[in-house]
Image (cartoon, rainbow, N blue to C red):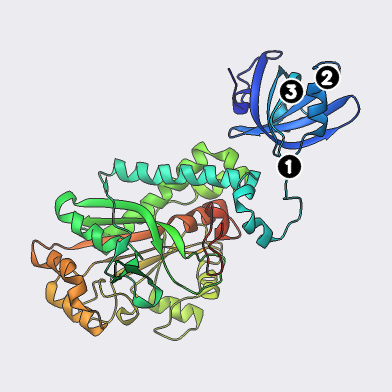
Amino acid sequence: MFTPIGFVLDGKAAEGESVSLRGWVHRARASNNLAFVVMRDSTGTIQCAVKKDSVPENDFEDARKVFIESAAEVSGTVHRDERAPGGWELRATMFRLTHHGEAFPITEHQSPELLLDKRHLWLRSQKLTNAMKARDHIVRYLREYFQQQGFWEVSPPIITKSGCEGGSTLFELDYFGEKAYLSQSGQLYNEAFITSLEKVFILAPSFRAEKSRTVKHLTEYWHLEEEAAHYDNEDNMRLQEELVSYVARKLAENDAPFLRHFNRKTEELFAIEPPFHHMTYDEAVETCGIEWGDDFGVPQEEKLTEGLEKPLFVTRFPAEIKPFYMATTPDGKYALNADVLAPEGHGEIIGGSQREWNYDALVNKMRAQGLDLKEYEWYLDLRRYGSVPHSGFGLGIERLVKWLLNLEHIRDAVPFPRVINRAYP
């Protein structure tokens, strides 16, 4: 029977209790009579002291010659030792190699490109291990909030004939002789569900062929998208700030050990409470000194959120720069939409809007943007039969993780990042 390392680190094993552990070698050093082998498993790391006169001869030789990332099993007694990582040490009576392996190809101070080439191995690092654990918890809290609010989780197709965010960022593929695309968003399919389930969300991959080289862009990312019947844009924004605040609070309450790895203080997350800051697009343009009709880049997002502790809603963008599905003000000048910008320069994490639910208005917008109505016949049907006002938003999981953990680069918020120059491994 093997004991998780975390069980020992949490003080659930008594002083002097015999346990058996198994995992991988995190670090190792040895002398003629003593080897210190730091073992790790999915629950933590612990130092194992392997003395020559306390284990069989072959066990000691294995401990002395072990490689980093060798797999091993260790038995012994647990003892408190403040000098050891985690404050506990295992004094070994048995050390058995499961797999000695080869010398690990990653050492200190490697280039980012090498670490990306060896991503399948670098995932074992403490930084990425804790980031993936935190990501798992964040996704759980997102689902938990929606379930508490009576939303249904649904599943959209990934292969589609209909673009959502414009043709320039579509990944095209040959679908048995026909042109199809990888999904940019499941939003249009979400809208099909609201007349039966009323409030829905999806969590699925989305693909954007954006040739952007920034710390917040991926070509493949995980997309949390919500849609709700009878919601206007104000309802939609309230839902977004409550959702984000819920996740931040749960992280602060339950996951302080993860946060410490990223120098993120719990009080910073507790401060993320409604109401969020609000600013219109016109006000933001004046603040940034850009041309009306331009979108915001990284410098503008940093300026708009400078000094803020919680996110900023930027509302009412020019309708002419937004997609066809967004409802507009009566004069048609502004979209009834909002982007959520995270503080500390992390940029946009959510984009949402009230949807255009009137058939004639939607057709006019689609024609103005040069869309082929035949490809959207099914979507137009949603406006022909029982249409109601509704709203929704899309949240980028990796961008949310990047901000909440205060990561420098979005590639560390996803196991195998896909960017414009990388689809390996």
Up-down: is 357 above or below 20? below
For badge 1, the amino acid type reads Glu
Q: Say the numbered circle drawn on residue 95.
A: 3
Viewer-proximal residue, 334 or 34? 34
Helix or strand or loop: what does disc 2 sit on?
helix
Viewer-proximal residue, 399 or 303? 399
Q: Earlier in the sequence, mark 1 or mark 3?
A: 3
The residue most toward the left is: 385
Q: Earlier in the sequence, mark 1 or mark 2?
A: 2
Q: Residues within 10 Å of mark 3 (few under 14, many from 20)?
A: many
Q: Earlier in the sequence, mark 3 or mark 2?
A: 2
Helix or strand or loop: what does disc 1 sit on?
loop
- Mark 2 highlights which residue? 57
- CA separation in Å, label 3 and label 2: 10 Å
The residue most toward the front is: 177
The reply to whether callout 1 and callout 2 are in contact (CB within 8 Å) is no
- Mark 1 highlights which residue? 102
Q: Residue at x 31, y 82 (%)?
A: 320
